[in-house]
């Protein structure tokens, strides 16, 4: 057995990032969260945990039982973790300050269960996370600690719950991918140093939204659909779970788009929990991420649940989309 385990890789990353302790512990907690949620998702159908709770969340979306379980598990996992002082979650209106963690130097932003629309159909789902160093030096963290641009991420990653469970992350260095061996509950390095391919792959967008787009956006998507792009021919693929669509794009190349709409120019996806962490990973793998005009990682959030349009993937594809939108 010559494969590294996830904890061994965390330890190496921490050493090379000179992160003076703590970071590998935080990353290990995300690995624990991944294993706990993978098990919940696998069993949900047997134990009556599919379907809705009958309530809506801060985003005005219908809440599913697994959304609640995922957020509760996230909070449990970071309880009594003195190096983390606060958690921002897509599922919570306000940030969650961890009691006893005031001196902790990290804050985390998390989409606990991305793509939960796929719960009932055994489709792909995911967890997305970002880790930032807090800015204030002590006491209870403030909102400003959470409103940091993606370029200040210390580490980011996602977990994909599909036929297998994978965890992909970067702590500023290479993007490494790990696959869970369920029989022993350990992640092993299976995809070292992921580089996003150029000139191949798929385009991924919910084309049913076409009537809501402006003319330039329609033209971009039409160019990909009708294979008129300079960057090459692309197949159409859409899983309806951002993590699943991004994972395919990262490994096979191409572009993921969630454009802004005429009546909703900010689009759907959340900057802190979705766009910034995935943009960080995409850039570390040699790709690009913009909102159609500017680099996602340079956008400074003004509020917790800020949304931005998203164009994410191979550099050539994202550049070409950007040029058409300009
Ligand atoms: O978290 C938002 C999300 O569920 C993403 O996972 C997914 O890519 C997107 O929404 C799907 O949105 P739509 O149903 O509008 O295509
Ligand atoms: Mn999501």
Image (spheres, rainbow, N blue to C red):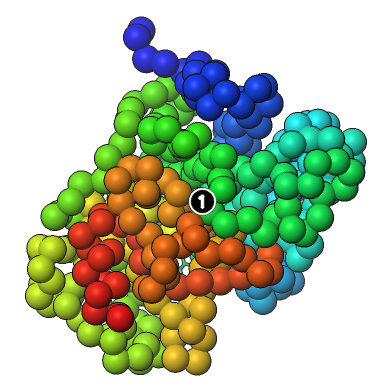
The quadrant in which the N terminus is found is: top left
Say few, some or many: other residues with alpha carbon within 10 Å of mark 1 (under 14 / 14 to 19 / 20 or more). some
Q: Is residue 177 left or right of residue 33?
A: left
Task: Please give left or right for residue 221 compared with residue 77 in the image.
Answer: left
Instruction: Provide the secondary structure element on which disc 1 rests.
Output: helix
> Residue, x 57% and y 23% (percent of image)?
18
Task: Name which quarter of the figure residue 78 lies in.
Answer: top right
Q: Position of residue 168 (x, y in %)?
A: 44, 38
**Residue 74, visible in the rendered structure:** no
- Left or right? Give the position of 33 relative to 56: left
Q: In this view, does 129 lie above or below 120?
A: above
Is residue 304 or residue 205 the one in the foreground?
304
Of the pair 139 and 278, the residue shown nearer to us:
139
User: What x and y, as percent, mark residue 234?
Assistant: 15, 63
Picture residue at 50% right of the left edge, 34% below the top: 171
Residue 310 at least partly seen:
yes
Residue 319: quadrant of the picture:
bottom left
Whether residue 67 is situated above or below residue 5 in the rendered picture: below
Residue 128 against residue 117 in the figure, above or below:
above
Is 208 placed above or below 80 here? Answer: below
Instruction: Depth check: give the residue in front, 99 or 235.
Output: 99
x and y percentages locating residue 261 in the rendered image:
44, 85
Give the quadrant of the C terminus.
bottom left
Q: Residue at x 45, y 73 (%)?
A: 309
Residue for badge 1: 151
């Amino acid at each position: 057995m010559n494969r590294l385990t996830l904890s061994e890789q965390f330890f190496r990353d921490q050493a090379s990032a000179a992160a003076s302790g703590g970071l590998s512990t935080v990353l290990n907690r995300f690995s624990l969260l991944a294993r706990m949620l993978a098990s919940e998702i696998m069993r949900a159908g047997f134990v009556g945990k599919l379907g809705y709770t009958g309530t809506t969340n801060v985003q005005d979306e219908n809440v599913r039982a697994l959304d609640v379980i995922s957020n509760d598990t996230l909070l449990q996992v970071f309880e009594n973790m003195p190096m983390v002082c606060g958690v921002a979650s897509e599922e919570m209106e306000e940030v969650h300050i961890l009691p006893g963690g005031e001196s902790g130097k990290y804050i985390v932003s998390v989409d606990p269960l991305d793509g939960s629309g796929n719960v009932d159909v055994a489709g792909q789902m995911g967890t997305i996370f970002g880790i930032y160093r807090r800015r204030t030096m002590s006491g209870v963290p403030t909102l400003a600690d959470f409103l940091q641009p993606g370029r200040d991420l210390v580490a980011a990653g996602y977990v994909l719950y599909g036929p297998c469970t994978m965890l992909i992350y970067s702590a500023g260095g290479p993007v490494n991918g790990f696959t869970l061996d369920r029989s022993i509950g350990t992640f092993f390095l299976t995809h070292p140093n992921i580089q996003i391919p150029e000139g191949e792959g798929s385009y991924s967008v919910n084309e049913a939204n076409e009537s809501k787009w402006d003319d330039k956006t329609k033209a971009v998507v039409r160019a990909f659909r009708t294979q008129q792009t300079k960057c090459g021919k692309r197949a159409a693929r859409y899983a309806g779970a951002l993590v699943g669509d991004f994972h395919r794009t990262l490994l096979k190349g191409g572009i993921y788009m969630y454009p802004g709409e005429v009546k909703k120019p900010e689009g759907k996806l959340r900057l802190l929990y979705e766009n910034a962490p995935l943009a960080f990973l995409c850039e570390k793998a040699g790709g690009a991420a913009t909102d159609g005009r500017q680099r996602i990682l340079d956008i400074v959030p003004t509020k917790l649940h800020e949304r931005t349009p998203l164009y994410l993937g191979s550099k050539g594809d994202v550049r070409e989309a950007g040029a058409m939108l300009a």
